[in-house]
Amino acid sequence: MNYLAHVYLSGDDKELRIGNFIADSVRGKNFKMFPRRVSDGIILHRKIDTYTDSHPIVSQSKEIIRPKYGLWSSVIIDLFYDHFLAAQWSEYNEMQLLPFTENFYADLKEYYAVLPSKVQRFLPIMIEYNWLYSYRTVEGMSRILHQMNKRTRGKSKMQFAAIDLEKHYNVLQSHFDQYMAELEEYVSHQKESLTNMDRL
């Protein structure tokens, strides 16, 4: 799952959302340096990633595009799944997607001092182009995939992945729908566990 899904799955807990969002920029046990609920969000992110990487439905999605994208298939499917979440947003959240993303950007600005330097650097661009909102259309995904390909110096060939998204749209959407139902149940249990966990 990519940024939008991690933020959504955190629920209404502002610090949990922040932690879940920044987790990829926090190494090892450095999560302990953050406020309690932010560190819980980092832990939750890692649990979601582990669950996702080992899930058979996600594996089916990866296999569809693996012949073309190889090891980059995982990253691409994460992005595709964020697209399906954004495209069907009203089925998952009462707040419309645009104000949801704007509220989250406001949270990030509020917690700017807590954000890792890597996140601080890309945050202005993310807000300016509203990455999270752009996930909702294939055209928006195409722009993001082109940007991602540049970051891999052209090695990933991600600039072509939007074509595969359209080609396999119905199958991949079905995979996402099945997986998301199971993931939400898993995350609910994990959030309850984190709330009750004594990490003194």
Image (tube, rainbow, N blue to C red):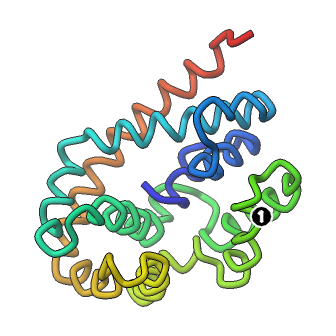
Rendered position, 190 above or below 17: above
Residue drawn at 75 percent across, 41 percent down: 15
Would residue 177 be found to the left or right of residue 138 on screen? left
Rendering coords of residue 121 (x, y %): 74, 69
Which residue is denoted by mark 1 in the rendering? 120
Up/down of 65 relative to 10, above or below: below
Q: State the quadrant of the C terminus.
A: top right
| Residue 10 placement: quadrant | top right
**Quadrant in which residue 169 is drawn:** bottom left
Q: How many marks?
A: 1
Percent across and percent down for residue 25 are: 62, 51
Q: Residue at x 55, y 18 (%)?
A: 193
Secondary structure type for disc 1: helix
Which quadrant holds the N terminus? bottom left
Residue 130, position in %: x, y? 65, 78
Query: In the visual, does 162 lie left or right of 110?
Result: left
Q: Position of residue 58 (x, y in %)?
A: 24, 51
